[in-house]
């Protein structure tokens, strides 16, 4: 007996999937058959998508809200669509694009139109992803130009760093003890030592 499934994707763990879940429930997808990934759409290496693929059988129906929820890589969207519809024999419904409903228009013209729409939408999805990456890179560059620092704030060296270094240089303090007192890694210590010596020149 064929089953109905839904696939939901948001790009990160702090994004909310409620809107997609509401739509899935509205079209009659059982909650137990909704697979959710909180991950980028750049490829299909997603745990719950892989679980969904293993579960799908010929004649099953898969709902997705929009083509970019499936993915944002032009070639991989095309490939996954072929795997789902041709190899696994699954029907797909893209809810916000009625032309992408493989239950309809299974004749030559219907297939041609659906394939054409899929190509256009998957191209748009990838283009949008590339624009997002470009905007992020521009935003980071602008922030760096303003002096914004990214990552964890660097821990300051202790006030007695120079004195500890002198003891270490005189072999009066083992390196491991110095690192412990400074609460820093060996790599960080040598970098800070180099910075200190550079400042003297």
Image (cartoon, rainbow, N blue to C red):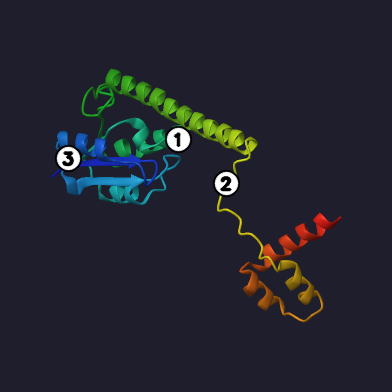
Mark 2 or 3: in front is 2
Q: Spatial distance from mark 2 to mark 3, Cα to Cα?
A: 42 Å
Residue at image location 31% in from the left, 30% down from the top = 66
Check contact, mark 1 vs mark 2: CB within 8 A: no
Residue at image location 72% in from the left, 61% down from the top = 192
Categorize mark 2 by other alpha carbons within 10 Å: few (<14), some (14-19), many (20+): few
Q: Place residue 186 in its image quadrant.
A: bottom right
Residue 104 placement (x, y as % from top left): 21, 24
Task: Note whether residue 90 is visible.
Answer: no
Relative vertical location of residue 102 with respect to residue 43 in this rendering, above or below: above
Q: Which residue is mark 2?
A: 150
- Mark number displayed over residue 29: 3
Work out whether residue 182 or residue 97 is closer to the camera in this orientation and state it.
182
Q: Spatial distance from mark 3 to mark 1, Cα to Cα?
A: 26 Å
Q: Secondary structure at mark 2?
A: loop
Q: Which residue is mark 1?
A: 73
């Amino acid at each position: 007996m064929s089953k109905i499934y839904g696939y939901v994707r948001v790009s990160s763990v702090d994004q909310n999937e409620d809107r997609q879940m509401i739509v899935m429930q509205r079209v009659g997808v059982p909650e137990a058959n909704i697979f959710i990934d909180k991950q980028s759409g750049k490829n299909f290496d997603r745990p719950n998508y892989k679980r969904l693929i293993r579960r799908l059988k010929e004649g099953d129906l898969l709902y997705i809200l929009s083509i970019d929820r499936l993915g944002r890589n032009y070639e991989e969207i095309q490939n996954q669509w072929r795997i789902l519809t041709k190899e696994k024999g699954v029907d797909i419904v893209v809810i916000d694009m009625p032309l992408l409903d493989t239950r309809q228009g299974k004749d030559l013209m219907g297939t041609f139109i659906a394939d054409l729409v899929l190509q256009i939408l998957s191209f748009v999805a990838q283009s949008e992803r590339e624009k997002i990456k470009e905007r992020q890179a521009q935003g980071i560059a602008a922030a760096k130009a303003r002096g914004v620092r990214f990552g964890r704030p660097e821990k300051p060296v202790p006030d007695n760093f120079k004195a500890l270094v002198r003891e270490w240089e005189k072999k009066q303090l083992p390196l491991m003890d110095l690192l412990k007192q400074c609460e820093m890694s060996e790599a960080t210590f040598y970098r800070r030592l180099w910075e200190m010596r550079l400042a003297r020149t």
